[in-house]
């Protein structure tokens, strides 16, 4: 569904993405892990051209995207994006946030958009917050609204950039639960996260990114229990915190655990 | 008590002149706000030539005295088309205030978190929709205090129009002062009228600010 060939991105003189190749199939859930600054966000943002890569090709549904000619707004409709800091529109109610793009972009009838928005908000457990303003919601609630806002455009793929990193630990679970439900319903998802429990449970594939390159790819079992690349091992030993459902023996032995518990997922 | 005498005697002239001052200011600031918005958008645009043009405009206007701009535009326009003194002055004041208003808009727009535009674009909203629906409504609330301030400056600066023969407050004061040989009295009276207008306008801005503040914003 999405294919990336030889993607290169520079910020000034600094090369942030180096020959990244990636293919994501329909209904696949791909989790992207890696140290801060390794280029995960940039890769995700290149996929919907919030950043413009200097080199490389991105195919969506078998067609190469040409940012100079194609209408990127059409492409972006098909790709939902959820941000670390939610980015809800503070001057609109929850409902206003969710119906904004369907009404203004797709020219959907308002009543129709409202009806659908209410269904979506119910689905993320916020049916009673329809008329609230974002500033009156908890972080977890805001992020669930952001997910509903993206879903309202009926995207074919959802991109998540550390959707739970800005949340208090006790609010992480409710957001991950919504994402899990989405995955179960067959949504194609690319997720940047440090929630390794989520990755183990939901991911079809885990990619490890280091200094602008994807240096290891595999099933969650392969990556977490038998990481091949020394950088992957190093990263996992630093990041893995909290209990796994079944702790990975391979990691446990040479690991410094932070004794830090994330909400049950 | 000659002052009271002059004041009551001239009320009729000054009220008419105050109305003209308000009309001149309203016309100038309405046009200036449109000019300001256009140049603010040019200044933050990705296109270099547009940014360049906006830079030149803002630099030239802020770097030269209003009275010079007023005369250049008044006589410059007059050599091409005759707009009359009122509209020449209004256009000159609009171009002058537009440069300051452009900077106010630019700062307001750039104070909105980048994530807002990114979220809008990621939903498929184009640049225009993103500006109109997401960025400008949020920027507007932050812009009101400095914009109100600029409007007050614009109101007071409209007095310069007297020098291109517009019979607004200051123009009438000049006229009456010389007719009656009473400079101190009539210029003081003009000052009182300006003060009253500015106070009225300040109350309006404060009221608008309070109203927007009770609305839910982050
Ligand atoms: N807009 C930008 N301008 C300049 N440098 C940037 C920009 N965005 C990201 N970077 C740099 O690119 C590198 C990769 O960033 P990012 O993709 O955000 O990494 P990650 O999401 O993995 O933490 C970092 O060194 C970051 O400082
Ligand atoms: Mg990031």
Image (cartoon, helix red, strand yellow):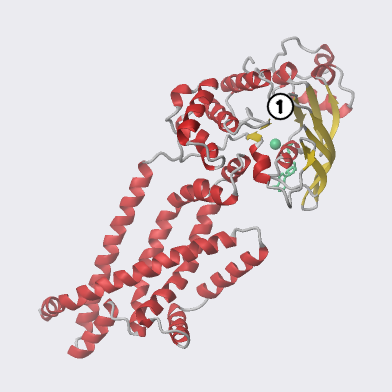
In the displayed structure image, the side of residue B37 where residue A186 appears, left or right: right
In the displayed structure image, the side of residue A48 where residue B202 appears, left or right: left
Label 1: few (<14), some (14–19) or many (≥20) C-alpha neighbours in 10 Å: many
Q: Residue at 37% across / 82% down in the picture?
A: B84
Q: Is residue B212 above or below residue B187?
A: above
Ligand 1, seen in the image, is in the quarter at: top right
Q: Position of residue B110 (x, y in %)?
A: 55, 53
Residue A161 showing in the rendered view? no
In the displayed structure image, the side of residue B103 where residue A235 appears, left or right: right
Quarter of the image containing the N terminus of chain A? Answer: top right
Q: Is residue A163 above or below residue B91?
A: above
Q: Position of residue B113 (x, y in %)?
A: 56, 45
Return the residue at label 1. Answer: A188
- Which image quarter: residue A150? top right
- Which image quarter: residue A173? top right
Residue B144 vs residue A80, the one in the foreground: A80
Label count reads 1
Residue A137 vs residue A240, the one in the foreground: A137
Q: Position of residue A96 (x, y in %)?
A: 47, 36
Q: Is residue B22 above or below residue A214?
A: below
Quarter of the image containing the C terminus of chain A? Answer: top right
- Which image quarter: residue B121? top right
Q: Is residue B169 above or below residue A125?
A: below
Q: Residue at 24% across / 81% down in the picture?
A: B173
Q: Residue at 38% across / 64% down in the picture?
A: B151
Residue A244 showing in the rendered view? yes
Chain designation of label 1? A
Q: Secondary structure at mark 1?
A: strand
């Amino acid at each position: 569904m999405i294919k990336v060939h030889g993607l290169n991105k520079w910020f000034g003189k600094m090369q942030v993405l180096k020959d990244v190749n990636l293919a994501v199939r329909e209904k696949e859930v791909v989790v992207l892990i890696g140290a801060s600054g390794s280029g995960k966000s940039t890769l995700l943002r290149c996929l919907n051209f919030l950043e413009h890569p200097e080199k490389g090709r991105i195919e969506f549904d078998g067609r190469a995207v040409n940012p100079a000619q194609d209408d990127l707004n059409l492409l972006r409709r098909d790709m939902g994006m959820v941000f670390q800091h939610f980015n809800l529109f503070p001057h609109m109610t929850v409902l206003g946030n969710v119906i904004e793009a369907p009404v203004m972009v797709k020219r959907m009838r308002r009543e129709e958009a409202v009806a659908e928005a209410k269904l979506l908000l119910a689905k993320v457990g916020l049916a009673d917050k329809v008329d609230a303003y974002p500033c009156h919601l908890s972080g977890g609630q805001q992020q669930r609204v952001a997910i509903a806002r993206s879903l309202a455009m009926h995207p074919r793929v959802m991109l998540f950039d550390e959707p739970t990193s800005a949340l208090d630990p006790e609010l992480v679970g409710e957001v991950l639960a919504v994402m899990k439900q989405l995955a179960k319903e067959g949504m194609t998802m690319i997720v940047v996260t440090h929630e390794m429990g989520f990755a183990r449970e939901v991911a079809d594939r885990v990619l490890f990114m280091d200094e602008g390159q994807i240096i290891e790819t595999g099933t969650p079992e392969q990556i977490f229990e038998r990481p091949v690349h020394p950088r992957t091992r190093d990263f996992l030993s630093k990041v893995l915190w909290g209990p796994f459902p079944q702790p990975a023996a391979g990691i446990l032995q040479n690991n410094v655990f932070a004794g830090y518990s994330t909400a049950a997922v | 008590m000659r002052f009271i005498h002059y004041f009551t005697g001239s009320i009729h002239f000054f009220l008419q002149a105050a109305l003209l001052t308000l009309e001149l200011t309203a016309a100038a600031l309405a046009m200036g706000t449109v000019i300001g918005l256009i140049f603010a958008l040019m200044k933050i645009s990705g296109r270099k030539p547009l940014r360049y043009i906006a830079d030149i405009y803002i630099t030239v206007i802020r770097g030269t005295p209003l009275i010079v701009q007023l005369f250049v535009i008044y006589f410059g326009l007059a050599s091409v088309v005759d707009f009359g003194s009122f509209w020449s002055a209004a256009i000159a004041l609009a171009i002058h205030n537009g440069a300051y208003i452009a900077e106010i808009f630019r700062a307001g727009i750039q104070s909105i978190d980048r994530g807002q535009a990114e979220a809008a674009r990621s939903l498929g909203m184009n640049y225009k929709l993103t500006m109109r629906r997401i960025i400008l409504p949020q920027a507007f609330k932050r812009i009101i205090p400095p914009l109100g301030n600029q409007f007050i400056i614009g109101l007071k600066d409209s007095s310069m129009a007297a020098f291109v023969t517009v019979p607004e407050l200051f123009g009438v004061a000049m006229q009456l002062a010389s007719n009656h040989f009473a400079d101190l009295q009539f210029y003081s009276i003009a000052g009182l009228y300006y003060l009253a207008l500015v106070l009225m306008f300040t109350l309006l801005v404060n009221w608008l600010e309070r109203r927007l503040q009770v609305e839910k914003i982050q």
